[in-house]
Image (cartoon, coloured by chain):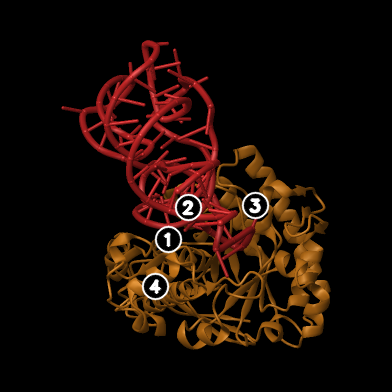
Chain colours: A orange, B red
Amino acid sequence: MDFTLEHTSSNSKARAGLFNTDHGDIETPIFMPVGTAGAVKGVHMKELDEDIKAQIILGNTYHLYLRPGMNVMEEAGGLHKFNSWNKPILTDSGGFQVFSLGDIRKLTEEGVRFQSHIDGSKHMFSPENSINIQRTIGADIIMAFDECTPGDAPYDYAKKSLELTQRWLDRCMIQFDKTEAKYGYRQSLFPIVQGCVYPDLREKAATQIQECNADGYAIGGLAVGEEESVMYSMIEITNSILPENKPRYLMGVGTPINILEAIDRGVDMFDCVMPTRNGRNGMLFTSKGTINIRNQKWSNDFTKVDPDGTSYVDRTYSRAYLRHLIISKEMLGAQIASIHNLAFYMWLVGEARVQIKKDNFKNWKEQMVQQLSVRL
RNA sequence: GGGAAGAUACCGAAGCGGUCAAACGGGGCAGACUGUAAAUCUGUUGGCUCAGCCUUCGUAGGUUCGAAUCCUGCUCUUCCCA
């Protein structure tokens, strides 16, 4: 799989590129909707494809391993066939669950023993079986198994954690090389830069990792409790070291502003649960600012959900109706809000790409950040 | 016509002499959410000149140092018997 850099801004690190996979091209900068359990919550594939215009979605190793399990996945012929998404897929390795399920897992040199959040049963995840599972899921891009370190970790812990992640990366690469894709198309393994909020650790991690000659590189362990300014400076340090000619993926980020700031600093790929989760909880992202649709002030507002929006739902439903649905806990409300937010995120990165190619990204970004900061 | 039970804040419902501006649930209002243990979670919900004060537990009186809590009348509600 190869990455073609199409344009780099003259006054910014922002880049426009094309990442080629066997399930199609991905135009960067890109946002990847999160479909943890094989579904982007509340959104059909048809909507994801035709309305939201998603080019690649995520799945999650830990969640898919527990349910439906790898027997079903293998018999289905991989996740693409199982969930009927014929474009690229990326799977996270389970590394984020080392962070998010911190209370129900035990971490050792060998790997992580999780206690299933579903039934309490114990499951060992190692770099090797994370790769094996991701081979069976069959995502186009698979991730190294890492420890996503909390943003408030002390230096000593962060250093040890990084060293462990680096040893696990070696094991991931060995396992990746020892095994083959199962379904006749290629898979890429992306290593992940950790190092918490410590510049020297990030620098060390990026320096080591860039020798992997991977198809792309990820920046992990950010937006996990640290200050945004710290996150931005970690991105700057990391991207100053990672190779120019490979895509950089900032894992789990973030708000629309976070994404623009990261693009400005040379990031190409993003994923985040925010458009779907926050959407389900009544928060809408728009080019004019954010809306809490549950607020009283929208109850009699019969203008469309987002008059500037690109999706079908934006032009069809009123804010008053969407507020009613969300407040009444009608499932359709969550669906509409999710579709709207995802379409907005896709518009945002698509427009960033247009502006980069016009070499106008910096100006456009400054203006957008102003607008996006507004609470409507 | 006779008997019984009950009336508590927006709604439902605890409370049965002081620690009650009044538990709890719902509803309302607001906030959070960043590689999804989340269609979830948190705060708040009588008024004010807010470490204090004022008005409130159907209504009018009474007992008491002190009443949402005890007594009496009245007004409504529900149920049972005729």
What chain does mark 1 sit on?
A: A
Q: Between disc 2 and disc 1, whose residue precedes?
A: 2
Q: Are marks 2 and 1 in contact (CB under 8 Å)?
A: yes
Please check whether the numbered discs 2 and 3 fall on a single chain.
yes
Amino acid type assigned to the residue bearing label 4 in the image = Leu
Chain holding disc 4 = A
Same chain under badges 2 and 1? The reply is: yes
User: Measured along the vertical axis of the image, is residue A211 above or below residue A99?
Assistant: below
Gap between marks 3 and 1, in whole Å?
21 Å
Q: Give the Cα distance between marks 2 and 3.
A: 17 Å
Eye-nearest disc, 3 or 4:
4
| Same-chain status of marks 2 and 4 | yes
The residue singled out by tag 4 in the image is: A322
The residue indicated by pointer 2 is: A231
Q: Chain of mark 2?
A: A
Q: Badge 1: how crowded within 10 Å, few (<14), some, or many (20+)?
A: some
Q: Residue at x 37, y 72 (%)?
A: A9
Q: Amino acid at mark 2?
A: Met
